[in-house]
Image (cartoon, rainbow, N blue to C red):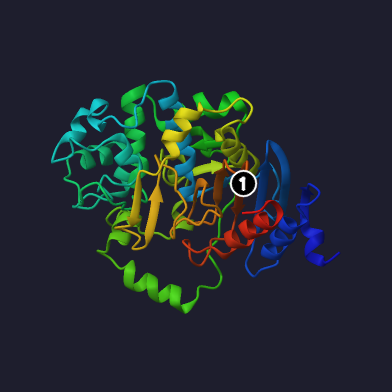
Amino acid sequence: MTDIDQVIRGEVAPGWEPVRQAFAAIMSGPGEHGAGLHIIHRGKTVVDLYGGSDGSGPYGPDTRQVVFSASKGIAAACLAVLADRGDLDFDAPVTRYWPEFGRRGKSGITVAHMLSHQAGLIAPRRGATLAEVLDGRPLADVLAGEPPRWPPGRPGYHAVTWGTLADELVRRITGGRLGEVLAELVCRPRDLVIGIGGAYASPPPAPVHTATRVPFLVRLTTAVFARPGTPVWEAMTVGGALTEPPDLWVGRPETLAAHLPAANGIATTRSLARLYDLLLPGTESPLVGERTWRAAVRPRARGRDRVLGIPSAYGCGFALPSRAWRLGSPTAFGHPGIGGALGLGDPRRGLALAFLPRTMPADALADDRHRTLLNAVTRVIGA
């Protein structure tokens, strides 16, 4: 047994040793502070592994962590539940629920357009303030009065405003914030340790850390394609409202307490994997019916992303396999996050997976750790 093997805690089912080896290899890398990996296959937990520290002690099954944009997959599950209850129609115009949204040429935008990053509202043209972003509702009002930057038809990643729009949509339907509805309809009934905003931010989750080594090419690409004024910069900073690095901004109490369904979800590894397992058709006590699930994960937008600059694909809130979102299988759905978190389900393989690292990747769109783990999964159960 190697030294790194001794600091990897947890269990794997027989035959899943390649995944343990892959996880151990990741944890032996420079700058890795801690991580959890949980995999459910055909309804059975087959991998439950932890390594490193959560900042106050060993990283374990109860460690709560911010998952950044993997929050979008969590929020998408909540929206699917509303659709399954008959409260939301993905194919209806947004104005059915939010009449003011139809101003400035947006009356034809459907809920599916909005949730698949086709609304063209990555940031207000005048920019936004941090207070507007954290409150959410003022920013939603501003976005409702904006013309779309592009017509629907091609995706343009709404890094932060996706959550603002989804939160306001839920408020118009239910009267509550998305995080509140998530807790009431999804998490509390199933004992899932997952939350977005509000009281769930206390006690604080485990902090995340920036990558220790960023390759020159990644730095150069960021300097060129994410410079102020570019679509990436607009989307990621909401037009300059977010000035701090993500690891600092998301660790602030006011950020954690805000309702930001695109960015500040908090989860444990076990609960995130279980959420995706509950979404798979045929699972025991599924979260939604198969018809709703198919509507939620059906490709709604594909093509060269107007923000990311590479091909992306989306369902109603879920990222789908593409160059931007490498999910390990052509039938997978889920969402990664800029911090390295990954949650996904794969109905063909009966797979649900969650990986939550405390160290951010050098390149969020090409996290080598995801490739390492997903390749190991494929070695065990096939492509």
CA neighbours of label 1 inside 10 A, class few (<14), some (14 to 19), many (20+): many
Taking the image as drawn, is residue 134 in sight?
no
Q: Tell me what residue is drawn at x 80 percent, y 61 percent.
A: 5
List x then y, in percent, for residue 293: 48, 33
List x then y, in percent, for residue 343: 55, 47
* Lateral position of residue 219 relative to residue 194, left or right: left
Looking at the picture, does residue 380 appear above or below residue 92? below
Disc 1 secondary structure class: strand
Residue corresponding to mark 1: 353
Q: Please state which of residues 200 and 24 is positioned toward the viewer in this rendering.
A: 24
Q: Residue furthest right?
A: 1
Looking at the picture, does residue 148 appear above or below residue 97? below
* Lateral position of residue 233 relative to residue 40, left or right: left
Dot 1 amino acid type: Leu
List x then y, in percent, for residue 366: 50, 64
The quadrant in which residue 175 appears is: top left
Q: Tell me what residue is drawn at x 32 percent, y 49 percent.
A: 130
List x then y, in percent, for residue 64: 61, 44
Q: The N terminus appears in which quarter of the rendering?
A: bottom right
